[in-house]
Amino acid sequence: MCVLSYFDRYWWCRFCGHFVRSGLAILPTVFAASGVTEQLQERANNLATWTFVGISVGLVFAIVGAFVLGPWAFYRTLQGYDLAVDSGKAIWWGFAIVVASLGITAAGFFGFLGLVGAY
């Protein structure tokens, strides 16, 4: 039994709770189809919980990494072309590109969720 299962696994947010509950409904069927017949609900809970934990931690690192590496890469690219652009402006342009990219991605993601009725 994982440590997180002692806490309410629906603490994330309304969407995440809905996603976990809908995912849990199919996991026992998947386990049963693969020949696993013991402790189906507990195994499904553990799998869903740790999957969400992994995705959440990965997203944190991806977003933090984007805000660090994105502006730095933009700055280094401009420096490589020997353009007469102020370093501070280049870094702020990098931030703007990262924010715009994440905004477009989030809009597409939530648009997809709305399209399939999950949000």
Image (spheres, rainbow, N blue to C red):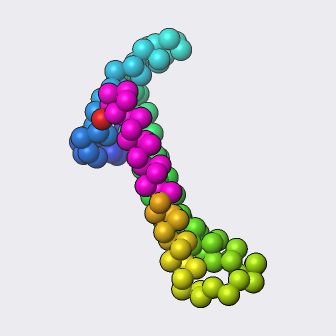
Q: Of 89 and 69, which appears nearest the observer?
A: 89
User: In this picture, is 103 found above or below 72?
Assistant: above
Query: Horizontally, is 100 left or right of 84 in the view?
Result: left
- Identify the image quadrant of residue 21: top left
- Identify the image quadrant of residue 6: top left
Q: Of 44 and 16, which appears nearest the observer?
A: 16
Q: Of 89 and 19, which appears nearest the observer?
A: 89
Is the magenta region chiefly helix, strand or loop? helix
* Residue at x 28%, y 46% (from the top left corner): 12
Residue 109 at what x, y percent from top left?
43, 42
Q: Of 61 and 2, which appears nearest the observer?
A: 61
Residue 60 at what x, y percent from top left?
45, 58
Q: Residue furthest front?
A: 84
User: In this picture, is 79 found above or below 110?
Assistant: below
User: In this picture, is 105 found above or below 61?
Assistant: above
- Identify the image quadrant of residue 86: bottom right
* Residue at x 76%, y 78% (from the top left corner): 81
Query: What residue span does the magenta drawing correspond to?
Result: 101-118
**In the rendered image, is residue 57 in sight?**
no
In which quadrant will I find the N terminus? top left
Residue 106 at what x, y percent from top left?
42, 49
Query: Horizontally, is 8 left or right of 90 in the view?
Result: left
* Residue at x 39%, y 19% (from the top left corner): 26
* Residue at x 48%, y 69% (from the top left corner): 96
Query: Horizontally, is 89 left or right of 118 in the view?
Result: right
Residue 61 on the magenta span: no
User: In this picture, is 64 found above or below 59?
Assistant: below
Residue 104 on the magenta span: yes
**In the rendered image, is residue 4 in sight?**
yes
In which quadrant will I find the C terminus? top left
